[in-house]
Amino acid sequence: MMKGKEKLLENLRYVFEPKSIAVFGASPTPGKLGNVVMKNLVLGEYAGKIYPVNPKYDEVLGHKCYGNVLRVKEKIDCAIVVTPAETVPKIINECGRMGVRGAVVLSGGFSEVGRNDLEEELAKAALRYNISLVGPNCLGIYNPYARVDSNFNPAYKSGRPGPGSISFITQSGAVGACTIDIAAHYGVGIAKFISYGNGSVLNEADYLEYLENDKQTKSIILYIEGAKDGRKLFEAMRKVNRKKPIVAMKAGKYGKAMKAAKSHTGNLAGNYLAYRAAFRQAKVTEAENFDEIFDFIRIFNQPLPRGRRVAVITNGGGMGVLTADALEMHGFSMPELEEKAKTTLRKMMPGYVNIENPLDLVGDAGVGAYEKAIELAMQDKNIDSLIIIVLYQTPRIDERILGVLTRASDDRRKPVAVISVGGSYTEEKRRVLEGYGVPTYAYPLAAVKALEKLTVYSEYRKTLK
Amino acid sequence: MMKGKEKLLENLRYVFEPKSIAVFGASPTPGKLGNVVMKNLVLGEYAGKIYPVNPKYDEVLGHKCYGNVLRVKEKIDCAIVVTPAETVPKIINECGRMGVRGAVVLSGGFSEVGRNDLEEELAKAALRYNISLVGPNCLGIYNPYARVDSNFNPAYKSGRPGPGSISFITQSGAVGACTIDIAAHYGVGIAKFISYGNGSVLNEADYLEYLENDKQTKSIILYIEGAKDGRKLFEAMRKVNRKKPIVAMKAGKYGKAMKAAKSHTGNLAGNYLAYRAAFRQAKVTEAENFDEIFDFIRIFNQPLPRGRRVAVITNGGGMGVLTADALEMHGFSMPELEEKAKTTLRKMMPGYVNIENPLDLVGDAGVGAYEKAIELAMQDKNIDSLIIIVLYQTPRIDERILGVLTRASDDRRKPVAVISVGGSYTEEKRRVLEGYGVPTYAYPLAAVKALEKLTVYSEYRKTLK
C-alpha cells in the first residue's frame, strides 16, 4: 500500500506538469464548466496537447473533439473531468487502460450528497491504475509554471496569479478560488494551487508531502474542514513545517458550521480543539480567520527575525500609536534606537521631530527621511524587525518611496512589514509593492499579527538547530 | 461659561457652512499646505468667497491675495490658518476684531511640542471673541454639503467622500485622513468630518453635542487618544448615542503607545480600561481596532434587527461554513426556515441543493435563485437578519445581482449584510454596492462582527422605550 501511495505522489507530476490533457465534458457553450476549462487552457497558453472529449461535438475552441477517449491515439498525461458523477468511474477506468496517470475530477455528486458508492467506485478505478486523482467535487489545480488551470471560474471574474513561491492546499473550492483571486489582485505569485474537495484518492497529507519536495514551493497554505486521517495529517504537518512554513486554517469549527461542512465535501468536520492542538504541537501557524491566511503567508518571504524588538517608522502619528498598541498587545518591545542612530536622526530631522520609537517622521517627511531612518534601523543592534508605515496621502511622499520600500524588503538583514492605509491611490501602491514581494498591510493590527507569526516561527526554527 | 460654550457651538455653523473663508498662509507653490487648502476650495467648487491672506503674494490661484486680513472689507465667516504657530494667536485676535466667528487652525507647534503657552494664548483669543476654533495641530474639517475642505492632503492622493450621513470626530489627523480616503474609495458618503487635534477650544464632547442636532448626521465615528474631560465625554456619548449610534475607538492604550499619543496631540492618553468602561456604560459601540471602525459604522444604515436569528444565503459552501463559524462564535443562531419557505425552495432548487441554514445555493446559482431566497428569508418569521454571500467569480452570477442586493438592503424589513471575497472584479462590485449603501464585507468575520454590534445596539434601544 505504501508503495502505491509513493507511486501516486510520483504520478502527481502528470497532474501538475502534463504534456497533454484530455478534457471530458469539453463544451463550446459559454458559461458551461467544460467551456471555461477549455478556455483556461487555450487562452492561458497551455503549451501541451489538448484533447476535448464529448460525443456531442466535433470541435471545441478549434481543437478536434473526440466522442470517446479510446479514439485518441497519442499519449494523454492528464484527464480533467466535468461530466456528471455517474459517468466518472467509467471514464477513469478507460483513462487507466489508456495509460493516463493524472486526473482532476471537478464534478460533484459523490459522498457530499450521500453517493458514497459512486465515490468508492471512482477511487477503486484510480487506485487500480495508480492514477493520481485530484477531487472529486473541487476546483482542481492551477500551476502557473506549466499554465495548467482547471479552475472553472472565468478568468475575467477571477484572477490567475503568476508564478511564485506560495502553494495552496484547500478542501473548499470557493475559499481557494477567492484566495487566489485576491493573490492575483495584489500580484502575489503562487507555486501550486490544489483544491482537492472530497479527497477520495489523495488527501491533504499527501499533498503536503508532495509539496515538501516541490522546488517552486517555499511556503504552504492549508485550508481544511475535516481530514480523513488526523494522525497522518499531523505527522505530515510536523515534518513539512520544519522545512517550509505552513499557515493552516480549520473551518467548520462549531455545531451548524460543522454540519454545513459535512454536506460540503462529504468529510466529517472534526473537533476544532483537536485541530488546534495539532497545529500547536506541529508548530504550524494557525490562521483563525479567513483574512489572516493571506496576511500571514505573505510575511513568510521575509528573513526570520532574531527577537521581538521592533522599530516603527511612520509619517502619521496616529497610525504609529495604533501600531504601538498592537505591538504591545502581541508581546513585542519597541526599544530606543542606539545612541549613534539617535544622534544622526537628531542632526538630520527638523527640531519638532521626537526621536523616539515609534519614530514619527511627521506628515511632511519626504522619501529621503525614510531611506535614512530605514538604514539606521537595519544597522541598529537594538532592533530585530522593522514596521514601516507610509501614508501616501501626505503631500511630500512621492512614488520614489516604492523603490525605498522594495529595497528594504529585499535587504534581508531584518524582516520588514509595511503598513499603508487608505483608498484608491494607496491601494494602487499596495498592489505595486506586493507585486515586488513587499508584505504590505491595510491596517496596523494585520501587520503586527503577521509579524508575530513570523517571530514565533523563527523561535521554533531556532530550537531545531 | 455655559453661555459661552453654547455660543461656540452655535458659531460652529461658520466653520461648517461659511459664506466666506480667509486662508492665512495661502500659497501659489504646489505642495505647500496653503496651496493644497486653496486648491481644495477652488477646485472643490466651494461656492462662497475666498480671501487668501499672505503678505508675500498679490494673487493666489486667481484670487486677490491680502497682505493683512484687516484690509478685507467684506464679512469673513471662517479663517483657515496654516501659518507658523507663533503667528496664530495674533491672527485669531485680528479675526475676532473683524467679526470672524469660525476658525480652523491646521498649524502644529503648540502643546504637542511643549508650547502650552502659545496654545493658551490661542484659546484665550478665540474665547474672547466667541470664535469656534477647530484645532490646532489638525487636519481641520470637511463638509461635502457645503464643499468646505481644509484637509491638506492633495485630492489626487486622498479621496474626498460625497455627501452622506456618517460623521467623523477624530483626534488624529492621519487616522481621520485615512478613513475618509477609504470612505471615498468605496463611495460611502459623509456628513461632517472633524479632525480637532489638540482641541484647545472645542473638544470631542462639544463636537458630539453639535452633531446631535446636525440634520445630515445619522451616525458618528469617534476616534480618540486622550480626552481633556472624561466625565463630560461620557455624558455626551451617553446622550448622543441614544439618538445616533456612535462607533468609538480609543488609541494609545498601552505604555509606549500612550507616550506616543502624548507627543502627538499634547493630550494625555488616559487609561484604556476607563475608556472601555465608559464605552460600555454609555452603550457606545467600541471598535477595538482600526479596521472595525469602517466595518461597524457602515451597517448602522440598516434597520435594527429584532433578535439574533440569522439566515445565511451563499453560492460558495466554504464561505457559508466560515460565516456559520463566525456567527456561532458571536452568539447568533441559524434556525431552520419556516416549513412553507423550505417547501418553496425544494420545488425551485435542483435536487442536490440541501435546504438548510446556511442555505448553499451552490456554485451554479443564478441571480433568480438569490432573489427568491432573499424574499423568503425576509418574510420568514424565524429570521431576524440576513447575511448574503455572493462570490462573483462563479460563471452564472452576473451584474443583475447588484440590483437584487441593493433592493434587499433598501427593503428595511430586516438588516442585510453582504459578503463578497475576491480580487479586482469582486472589489469593483463591492464599491458599486457600497455606493448604494449596501454594507458589503471582504470576509465573513467582518460582516458578523458588524452585525453583532448592530444587534447589541438594537437590544439597547429596545430598553429605552
Image (cartoon, coloured by chain):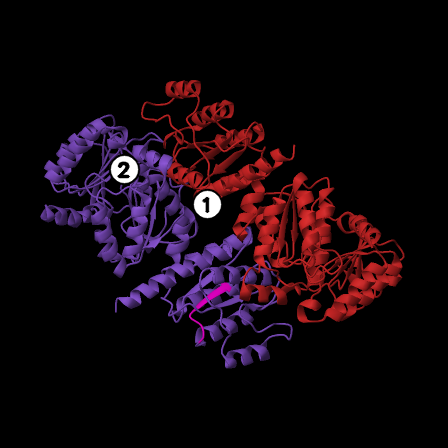
Chain colours: A red, B purple
Q: Which mark is residue A424?
A: 1
Chain letter of the residue beneath label 2 in the structure image? B
Residue A38 in view in this figure: yes
Chain letter of the residue beneath label 1 in the structure image? A
Report x, y in % for residue A99: 87, 56
* Amino acid of disc 2: Leu
When the figure is inspected, residue A41 is found, relative to residue B157, above or below; the finding is: below
When the figure is inspected, residue A366 is found, relative to residue B346, above or below; the finding is: above
Q: Is label 2 or label 1 in front?
A: 2
The reply to whether dot 2 and dot 1 touch (C-beta < 8 Å) is no
Which residue is nearer to you in this view: B103 or A250? A250
SS for tag 2? loop
* Amino acid of disc 1: Ser
Bounds of the magenta segment: B382-388
Residue A354 belongs to the span the image colors magenta: no
Which residue is nearer to you in this view: B91 or A304? A304
In percent of the image, x 54 and y 65: which residue is there?
A: A255
In percent of the image, x 43 and y 37: which residue is there?
A: A392
Q: Which residue is disc 2 drawn over?
A: B268
Residue B439 is drawn in which quadrant? bottom left
Which residue is nearer to you in this view: A337 or A102? A337
Report x, y in % for residue B370: 53, 69
